[in-house]
Image (tube, coloured by chain):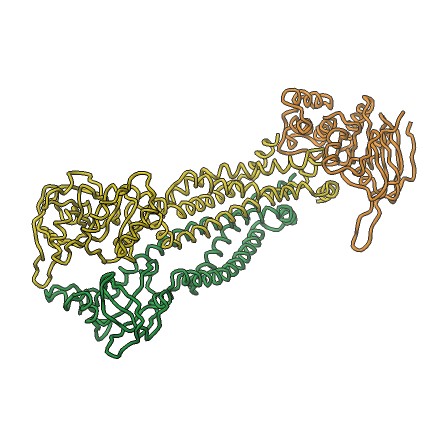
Amino acid sequence: MIAAAVCLVLAIAAPQDSTRRIAIDERLATDAGLHVGDRVMLAAEPGAVGEPAVIGAVVRRSADPAEIARGEYKIRLHLTQLQQLLGYGDRVDRFAVATTSDRVIGEAADRINAEAFGFRAHRSQDIAVQTSATFAVVSRFHRAIGIITIVASAIFLLCIMLLKVDERRRDVAALRLMGISGGTIVRGIVLEAAGIAVFGSILGVGVGIVTSWVVNLHYQGVYRTPLRFSIVTPDIMLGAVALSLVLGLGAGWLAAQRLVRTPPLALFGR
Amino acid sequence: MLFALAWASLVRHRARTLLAVLGVAVSAAMLLDMVMLSSGMRVSFGALLLSQGFQLRLAPRGTLPFDTEATIRDGDSLVALLRARPEVVAVSPVFGGQLHLITPRGVVATSALGVIPAVEGDYEVSEGHQPAAPDEMVANDALLAATGLHLGDTVHAGAGYDSQLRAMTAERILRIVGRVRFVYMARGQRGAALPLATFRGMQGHDADGRISLAMVRLVPGSDVEAERVVIERLLPRVTVISIAEALRQVDERRSYFTQLAVILGAVSLVVGFLLVTTLVTVSVNERIGEIAVMRAIGVRRWRIVGQIVVEASAMMLVASPLGLALGLVTARYLNTILADFPGMPERIDFFLFQPGAAWSSLGMLAACGVLAGIYPSWRGASLPIAMTLRQEAVG
Amino acid sequence: MTALLEVRALVREYPMGEERVAALRGVTFDVEAGDYAAIVGPSGCGKSTLLNLLGVIDRPTSGTVAIGGERVDRLSDAAATDFRLRRIGFVFQRFYLLQALSARENVELPLAEAGMKGTARRERARALLDYVGLGARVSHRPSQLSGGEQQRVAIARALANTPRIVLADEPTGELDARTGAEMIALFERLNADGTTIVVVTHDEDLARAARRVIHMRDGAIIGDERAR
């Protein structure tokens, strides 16, 4: 298929059977108020006379990350129709080849490239990787932001645990004076920290799911795409809970260690 | 006296103070990054557009410059018409396309621009000179590196390469006379420029008179918007884009980053606020007896609030430069990630340090810190003195 | 002698669930300028509540308190704070010194609050510490001082702005017998130098040292005797 900029002009005449049919995307249909059956004029240049076409279908855009930031419209024509419109003869930009099975894709591409026919065959998967480069960059960016957020959360959690454990100085001092071992106290505090971390992360997962839903709703509207911008998978949920648990345990342990190493009377402030 | 008390309170719990400072510093860094992100690309792009002094850009109707393969027919007459206008100082027409070079390393394809060297605004010559003669071209570092060619070398170039025949179409020999840096090309993108007439000639008759874009420089002090409207009315087949309009388009496309920056910036502020509030609340609770004693001996309430606010401010003061440094480092790292965006001009910065924005963001965080200190300290200083002292004595 | 402190029909009730419990039930008495009164009675009889009302750190449910002819029972928070700063000296059972400050800085705190600057403030603090016998330990932190020394610092702090009256709540309560005796002597010296003192105590020795002993029970005065 060849891709090119084509001008589309609204016309008022009723469609005729001989007129060729085209498909337009939802965005164009909405913005131009077009419907299936409407007749339009297609031209390769602004102001050129062009040729008539009838809208045969309104298609939904694919969830292509490479296109989200692009505001242009898309129409689909029959190959010969576009070639004729642009004066391209029988030239094409590329064509797709279906193989009998996924296993032979590499072999087929190698054979085509070895034929010295002048074409270069690429695996669809490789092309997908190239065209989704925008999203790959955004993904990397998000990952970096995520790491910064985790560092900030870890510090925040450690600070809170430290404060929380500090609040219990007198209780801990009393326990120590009663003969409760430091190990038991540390285990108690760490267990409490783990509980807080798990409860907090479950709450966080809930907030994440709601936020993800809002993010998708918002950006799907902004960019007019069915693409899902945010996905909360079971792996992500488990990862978040596990990370919180590790951070919580670490923070609790550190805070508890500080406390049990202080002499009980000092904890009483004497 | 207040400072001594504030200082003593901060050093009394060193680990806690250190963690709070670190937490606030990370929040400050994140906030700074988000402020830089929210305006960086816009400012950077605006500066880029203005760097060559052209205030208006003409593209085929309904498109943005080089956003599609569409071109403007009768570009030469359009340029002549523009040059005749009294407000116009210079018009730089550009025709964009592909060029194929036969090199010892094989056939190398490159983006190429046909320009009028005397008025071009797409590149800066870093070595050599402009392609004045019809058989001269200039290339950027990426192209020179890919081809292994040097200044002074000649090369067989063609507008197309028929891979079946393994032959160039419209082949001619060009001499590389300059090393240039393209203003609007992406990092690593190969680029060449040659005289407009030469490049059009290589594209065949179909390219006669066509241009992809025209950049217009106006007389200093002219009303850019008024001139844009006049030109658009004169030339209904083109879209005339002013820098303001281009920035608006950029705003639309980068709305994701703006919103992300606003959300994460707000989250950073809230986290910083919460951290300081928590810390100050606990600190006040610990010192509630001390505060009651101070009140009992006649220390005014606002003075106690002042002392605690001084503590919060001191943490902010230490954390801010730390956050600034951390923010600049992370911004640089994040910028290198986003610089890989396909088609993004090399000179665009997503994270642009602007002192005003940086100070205002740190100021916001500092204000949050102070506010975070006010409520718990006011609450602490407002507790009934007698009851608090009795509870402290029992506790 | 004129009455420095005038207490009339003082009532202080506290809400306790649905009910109100009376800690003071209509207390009336005067303390003359230069007097030294000890308020004694069993725990929970309302001694400390009375002292808090005299010290303007609490408000009565009804009744009046006047110090130096000025009504202090209905002062605004700011006015009460200022009154405490300039007219009243407080000594607490547990000293309540600021741990972060040295002995001298603790004494300087009310002086600074009253607006006294730099050298004059330091000299005044040092002189007060000399007066209570701590001239050699001005730079020590409370944690480096004994209980008796801490209480001396607290007394010096109470005297900082030359108050009209010093109120002391169980000032010997945390001290051993020997240190307590030293403290009693210090209070006697203070009073001999013209300071009006009202002290709440369980300490019989301290009460015996006062010129006047007021006995309380169940929120009311049940006896008022001149010791000498």
Total tally of numbered discs in the picture: 0
For the C terminus of chain B, the quadrant is: top right
State the image coordinates of residue A6 (x, y, percent, origin top left): 25, 64
Can you say whether B66 is above or below B322 in the image?
below
Residue closer to the observer: B46 or B205: B205
Can you say whether B25 is above or below A100 in the image?
above
For this orientation, the residue located farthest to the bottom is: A17
For the N terminus of chain B, the quadrant is: top right
Is A15 on the left or on the right of A158, as rendered? left
Q: Colour of chain A?
A: green
Is A78 on the left or on the right of B36, as rendered? left
State the image coordinates of residue A253 (x, y, percent, origin top left): 52, 50
Chain identifier for the orange-coloured part of the image: C
Chain identifier for the yellow-coloured part of the image: B
Residue closer to the observer: A141 or B266: B266
- Res A257 visible: no
State the image coordinates of residue C189 (x, y, percent, origin top left): 80, 23
Residue closer to the observer: C6 or B364: B364
State the image coordinates of residue A81 (x, y, percent, origin top left): 21, 71
